[in-house]
Image: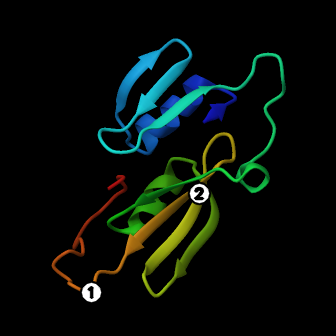
Amino acid sequence: MAVNDLEKSIQFYNEIIGLPIKSQRRTWVDLGTSGALLSLHPASLTAQHIGSSIENGISIGFLVGDLESSLQELKAQGVTVHRDIVERDAGKNAVILDPDQYMISLFEPIYEDRVQQTSGYQGFTPA
């Protein structure tokens, strides 16, 4: 994902969202532990970086254990909420924005088997 300020984006995804840095080079960083990785790199140094998620179609999604406490924690850290909590048949959903205005969907699923449902969870962390 091309970003305007690599250090600011690393701080957002690593310190605020909680994705661990898997590998890092001067102009590239991979975040995550297993499965899909989020790779950040600077936008072109010669061309202006334009286009938010709405214009370019990029969006990221994370599962959360408790959407309401996740949003409270993220708001307290200055994260912009693009769309507040919406109740769906499958669970709750909200959308926040990263430093480049990319949309990040946060989803708290409702499991038919309540044993799978996280109980008493406070805070935000990607599943």
Q: Residue at x 74, y 48 (%)?
A: 52
Disc 2: CA contacts within 10 A as few (<14), some (14-19) or many (>=20): many
Quarter holding the N terminus? top right
Q: Give the camera-side residue of 85 and 46.
A: 46
In this rendering, the answer to whether 30 lies above or below 28 is: below
Indicate which label's residue lies in the foreground, 2 or 1.
1
Labels 2 and 1: the sequence-earlier one:
2
Is residue 11 in view? yes
Q: Secondary structure at mark 1?
A: loop
Q: Are marks 2 and 1 in contact (CB under 8 Å)?
A: no
Disc 1: CA contacts within 10 A as few (<14), some (14-19) or many (>=20): few
Amino acid on which the number 2 mark rests in the picture: Ile
Q: Quadrant of residue 32?
A: top left
Q: Secondary structure at mark 2?
A: strand
* Cα distance in 3D space between marks 2 and 1: 27 Å
Looking at this rendering, what residue extends furthest in the top direction?
26
- Give the percent coordinates (x, y) of residue 102: 65, 48
Which residue is tagged 1? 112
Amino acid on which the number 1 mark rests in the picture: Glu
Is residue 68 in view? no
- Give the percent coordinates (x, y) of residue 122: 29, 62
Q: Give the camera-side residue of 76 and 115.
A: 115
Q: Residue at x 70, y 26 (%)?
A: 43
In this rendering, the answer to whether 78 lies above or below 62 is: above
Quarter holding the C terminus? bottom left
* Numbered mark located on residue 96 in the image: 2
Q: Would residue 70 appear left or right of 42 to someone viewing this image?
A: left
Q: Quadrant of residue 67?
A: bottom left
Looking at this rendering, what residue extends furthest in the front direction?
35
Q: Would residue 8 appear left or right of 64 to someone viewing this image?
A: right
Q: Quadrant of residue 40?
A: top right
Q: Would residue 109 appear left or right of 27 to someone viewing this image?
A: left
